[in-house]
Image (cartoon, rainbow, N blue to C red):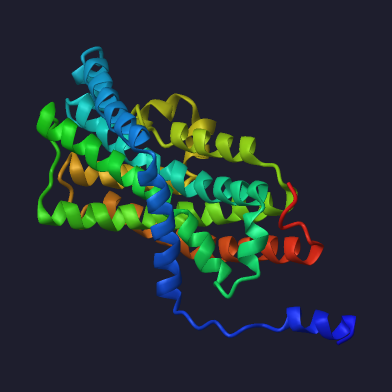
Amino acid sequence: MNRLEVLKLFMVEEKRTKSSLRQLSAVVWSQLKMMLAYKSWLIMDLLSTFASVVMYYFVGMQVDPTRLSQSGWGTSYLAFSLVGVATSNYLWACLTRLSHSIQHEIRGGTLETIAVTPINMFIFFIGLTARGYLVSLIYLVGVFTVGVYGLGAKLSFTPQSLFLFITLFVLMLVSNQALGLVAAGIIMVYKRGDPLVFILAAVNEFLAGVLYPLELLKRFPAVQLLSMLFPYTYALDGMRRVLILGASILDLKVLTDIVVLGVFSIMLVPLGLKTLAWGYNRIRREGTTSSY
């Protein structure tokens, strides 16, 4: 067998025998096992969740309830901050987790090995986000549990409010994960970009008003306009209206938030998928799947 015949053997595309669902579950399970392997880290993360909620409870004592009420968010700063703090971890998971995981795989030399297996690489990339999502879920449940049942924050958890919260939450994940796909595709090619992704997530979190009412930005029109360019701004506004004010689907502002998030998702998801595919195909073509 000559050299050309040997090369042709390696170039043959093997039939993918496993379903996408089984491949995804395998990647998710591997991420879950790695997460559970660090038990002390999990315990510390749970303790930090409790500490952060308590911190905002005491911060709320310094906030004038009248000024918060004038902004249209009731009189409880703890309830106001809980929604932002609980969901902000998912913002970071969406924007930074995939790019960070891919860089880790490249540095470890495992991305190239995985690339030659029959696994669907898109399924693999999506599965890499599982750990960030699982950690963020623990944080979200912990924050709401401690805040509502431990410190008495007033939030509406009726069937209608939960349905609307989940709807807004899912749209937030889809739109922001699409931005994360864009970041991951670019970082795969240029190998650097973590500082920019970090800045994007931090600016997004700040401009969305995680810890302060967006009404305060009216004194800074340029900054207020910039905040409207991020999907998390609309998601956080809608989730707060639903959980704090008990707004329904008939509320015009909640409906507007849902529509805007839907538009963001429709625009960003194709862009994210194309950028991720572009980045992966380019590093395969250039032979840089194991170089960093």
Residue 246 vs residue 72: left or right? left
Above or below residue 199? Residue 283 is below
Location of residue 78 (image quadrant): top left
The quarter of the picture where the N terminus appears is bottom right
The location of residue 140, given as percent across then percent down, is 28, 41
Residue 17 vs residue 259: left or right? right
Location of residue 10 (image quadrant): bottom right
Residue 244 vs residue 199: left or right? left
Above or below residue 78? Residue 101 is below
The location of residue 289, given as percent across then percent down, is 71, 58
For the point 23% across and 19% down, the residue is 60
Q: Is residue 260 something that shows in the picture?
A: no
Q: Nearer the viewer, residue 34 or 163?
A: 34
For the point 33% across and 29% down, the residue is 44
Residue furthest to the top? 62
For the point 40% across and 73% down, the residue is 21
Residue 72 vs residue 87: left or right? left
Q: Nearer the viewer, residue 30 or 49?
A: 30
The location of residue 174, given as percent across then percent down, is 43, 58
